Image (cartoon, rainbow, N blue to C red):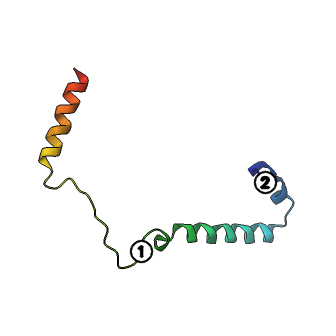
Amino acid sequence: MLLADITEEIKVLPRFEKLQLIEAISKMLLEEENPTRYFATEAVYPVFTPDNQEKAAAQLQQFLRQALS
């Protein structure tokens, strides 16, 4: 269903039902936002940071110099 179609159907609803619809959509969005859907509990995930990565920074700088030359 297209957004334009949904919009036309929503326009005829009374104010209270529109608010209920907003509430239902908000709940759906919160459920989708829940990190437990994407990450397993008790799992360890690596986090990559630039700390102690001087060699990588130097390689990137060299690459950029070559690309701009």
- x and y percent of residue 30 in the render? 56, 70
The answer to whether the residue labelled 1 contacts the one labelled 2, judged by CB atoms less than 8 Å apart, is no
The residue tagged with tag 1: helix, strand or loop? Answer: loop
- Quick one: which residue is furthest to the right in this view? 12
Instruction: Report the amino acid beneath label 2.
Output: Thr
Nearer to me, 38 or 61: 38
Tell me if residue 32 comes above or below residue 11 in the rendering.
below
| Relative to 52, 43 lies left or right | right
Query: Mark 1 to mark 2: distance in Å?
Result: 37 Å
CA neighbours of label 2 inside 10 A, class few (<14), some (14 to 19), many (20+): few
**Dot placed on the residue nearer the N-terminal end, 1 or 2:** 2
| Residue identified by numbered label 1 | 40
Q: Residue at x 19, y 27 (%)?
A: 65
Q: How many marks?
A: 2
Placement of 1 over or under 28, stated as above or below: above
Left/right placement of residue 64 relative to residue 6 reads left
Q: Residue at x 80, y 70 (%)?
A: 17
Disc on res. 51:
none
Q: Amino acid at mark 1?
A: Ala
Q: Is residue 35 above or below residue 5?
A: below
Q: Position of residue 58 (x, y in %)?
A: 14, 39
Q: Please, what secondary structure does the residue beneath circle 2 have?
A: helix
Q: Quadrant of residue 62?
A: top left
Q: Position of residue 12 (x, y in %)?
A: 87, 60
Residue 15 % position (x, y): 80, 67
Q: Crowding near pointer 1: few (<14 within 10 Å), some, many (20+)? A: few
Q: Quadrant of residue 32?
A: bottom right
Q: Residue at x 73, y 68 (%)?
A: 21
The numbered disc on residue 7 is 2
Q: Could you tell me which quadrant the C terminus lies in?
A: top left
Nearest to viewer (mark 1 / mark 2): 1
